[in-house]
Image (spheres, rainbow, N blue to C red):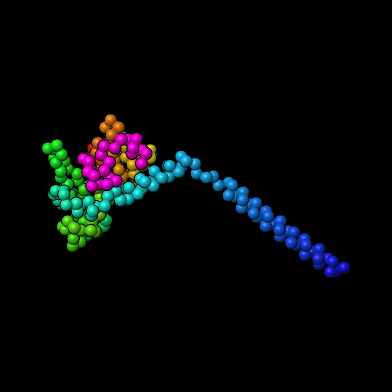
Amino acid sequence: MKFGILIVIFLVSISCKNATENNSDKIKTNRFELLPYPDKEEQEKYLKNLNLTTFLENPIDLQEFKNKTKRDVTTSVTNGLEYYFQPKINDSIFYSYNFISTVNRQLEINEIVVFKYGKNQHNYEDKTEILIELKINNKDSDLGKANLIGLSKTELESEFGTDYLTFKNGIAYSNKNKVLILEIDSSIVKSYRYIKLNTEKIDDGLIEQIIK
């Protein structure tokens, strides 16, 4: 009799275990079913946001751009604007590169501002300098992905999305302490400024301060 009771208890134990495992599997299955798969619109929004953050993190390969032998450039020390990102490093300066070209007999200039420090701060080949601002008014294929002049607003939205601030003459994309301010004329990019800022609070007031 005792042996029979033990068999019954053993069978009940196995039955409970199987029931628990089956319930666990159902719970796991239900959990997976409850997680929504991103629809096409969400996927596109994610990819555009990724394009934007990647661009703002590193819009150009500065050293490669500077080393293009075909270009004329003038250099000068410049004042750092109050909204510029400025590391707390002694013995440092802001430096301006003016890249000059002639198109249809007209002089065209694109300016790049960098933060330089240490023993190489007056050296054009300085690889430690930090990109602070791009002031781009003219097309230049050497800018690569940052050759935005002439693009339509629709093309910008296709690449970077529609999450931007608007102002009278254009739009501004931003992420953390980096901003891309584009002057738009007849839905075409006429000029733009990329700036690394000393703040992550980017609003209409700051944009107005920059473009005034």
Quick check: 164 left or right of 4? Answer: left
Which contiguous range is marked in magenta?
Answer: 136-159
| 61 and 74: which is toward the camera | 61
| 70 and 24: which is toward the camera | 70
Q: Which corner quadrant holds the N terminus? A: bottom right
- The single residue placed furthest to the left in the displayed view is 105
Is residue 129 visible to the viewer in this orientation of the structure?
yes
Q: Quadrant of residue 139?
A: top left
Question: Is 162 placed above or below 142 here?
Answer: above
Residue at 36% over, 48% down: 53
Residue at 64% over, 54% down: 25
Residue 109: horizontal and vertical position, in percent?
17, 43
Residue at 14% over, 48% down: 72
Quick check: 34 left or right of 52? Answer: right
Q: Is residue 196 magenta?
A: no
- The single residue placed furthest to the bottom in the displayed view is 3
| 192 and 165: which is toward the camera | 192
Question: Is 191 placed above or below 68 here?
Answer: above
Quick check: 3 left or right of 103? Answer: right
